[in-house]
Image (cartoon, rainbow, N blue to C red):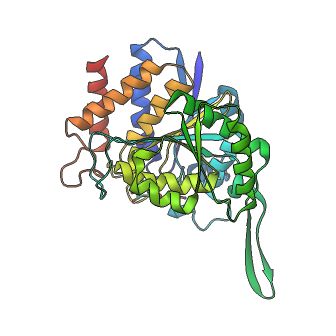
Amino acid sequence: MRKILVLEGDGIGPEIISCAVKIIELIKNKFHLNIELEFDYIGGACIDKYGVPIRKETIQKAKKYGIVLLGAVGGYKWDKLPIRPEQGLLTLRKEMGVFANLRPIHSFPVYTGPLKNTSQIDILFLRELTSGIYFGKPKKTKIVNNQKIAIDTMKYSEKEIERVVDMAFKFSQKRRKFLVSVDKANVLESSKLWREVVNRKSKEYPDVKVEHHLVDSFAMNLILKPQYFDVVVTENLFGDVLTDEAAVLVGSLGLLPSASLSFNRGLYEPIHGSAPDLAGKNIANPIGTILSVALMFKYSFNKENIHDLIYNGVFKTMEEGILTFDLSPNKYYSTTEFTEKIIDNIIKLS
Ligand SMILES: NC(=O)c1ccc[n+]([C@@H]2O[C@H](COP(=O)([O-])OP(=O)(O)OC[C@H]3O[C@@H](n4cnc5c(N)ncnc54)[C@H](O)[C@@H]3O)[C@@H](O)[C@H]2O)c1
């Protein structure tokens, strides 16, 4: 029996997770899988209930079960507190050791965004997730000469770079054998080391072509010629920003899933936040979360057939013109109606 720890979080978190749970229940019954779900708290909801953004018990369960499905954290209500909901998520990622955040960015059957050149995109981002400027110390604000000075520290060890880069090479071998590494090696020490490690690693993968791109020009080329890219590996902050940018290539932040992996654990969550502007309205797009479930079956259960089935169910629903508010504000299905349509299609396709 495998246990999945489910953390709904805040804002639209509970709404989108309830859709994802329906998909898991469907798959579990269809394929007779021995899976159990256990729910717990993270983020603002956890601060409200326990006074902390994540509890030690929750982290222990996450490590023990090795599979976590998460909604999103954060919201206006907790913005002024000294301890923020987001800290719960950062701690969870770090403690689970899920150093590689996989974010597949590919064209969907429907595009309603502002760009013209958005067909045949298929990029796999690997964002380093447990180091870099989000975690580096010192991280503080101090007073010097009567004014505040804020300090963040961008820090990487060779080992931290090597393990995510190695994973990126392995994914490249299974795809177009073309890896782009994004850094700022013309300015940052951590990026110089990043580039050095990529070059060293590339000798172990002579079949993979490697290019180094500076993050500023990469940000432009990602929009100009997205079809050029296949696997892209980068550090934590750059990856965070670039993948939100990449959401414009697919039409909505609500579409994009992610899998954060270590060698034996997986944390699955959509790439978007808690969207407080949509919370409680039953209009959020659940696709990013549902496709995160597909990634969970692929990477934690080794069931590629289930991954494909869920993807096909989502694609078929979109092809039928059934869309959520973010993609079609004038004629849309609610979050729950939309999920029922996906369920119908998964049943039809299986
Ligand atoms: N992983 C996480 O939990 C995570 C990630 C990013 C931001 N946050 C937190 O979320 C809160 C809101 O942040 P934000 O507004 O900058 O980012 P956001 O991702 O929540 O929202 C950005 C925009 O995308 C839209 N959007 C997001 N998810 C959507 C969905 N499923 N369907 C349709 N539209 C969707 C929102 O309506 C909003 O217009 C903040 O507290 C922030 O710290 C959490």
For residue 279, say whether it is visible.
no
Q: Position of residue 182 (x, y in %)?
A: 59, 52
Which residue occupies the extreme bottom position in the image?
A: 146
Q: Nearer the viewer, residue 195 or 127?
A: 195
Which residue occupies the extreme top position in the image?
A: 32
Q: Position of residue 66 (x, y in %)?
A: 65, 28
Q: Is residue 261 above or below residue 191?
A: above
Q: Position of residue 230 (x, y in %)?
A: 48, 40
Report the side of 221 relative to 302 (left or right).
left
Which quadrant is the C terminus positioned in? top left
Q: Is residue 153 above or below residue 158?
A: below
Residue drawn at the location 73% of the way across and 56% of the way down: 192
Q: Nearer the viewer, residue 193 or 285?
A: 193
Which quadrant is the N terminus positioned in? top right
Residue drawn at the location 19% of the way across and 54% of the way down: 330
Q: Quadrant of residue 98?
A: top right
Q: Nearer the viewer, residue 334 or 128?
A: 128
For residue 306, say whether it is visible.
yes
Residue drawn at the location 27% of the way across and 44% of the way down: 334
Report the side of 44 relative to 140 (left or right).
left
Q: Nearer the viewer, residue 1 or 101?
A: 101
Q: Quadrant of residue 349?
A: top left
Q: Quadrant of residue 333?
A: top left
Q: Position of residue 155 (x, y in %)?
A: 76, 56
Q: How many marks?
A: 0
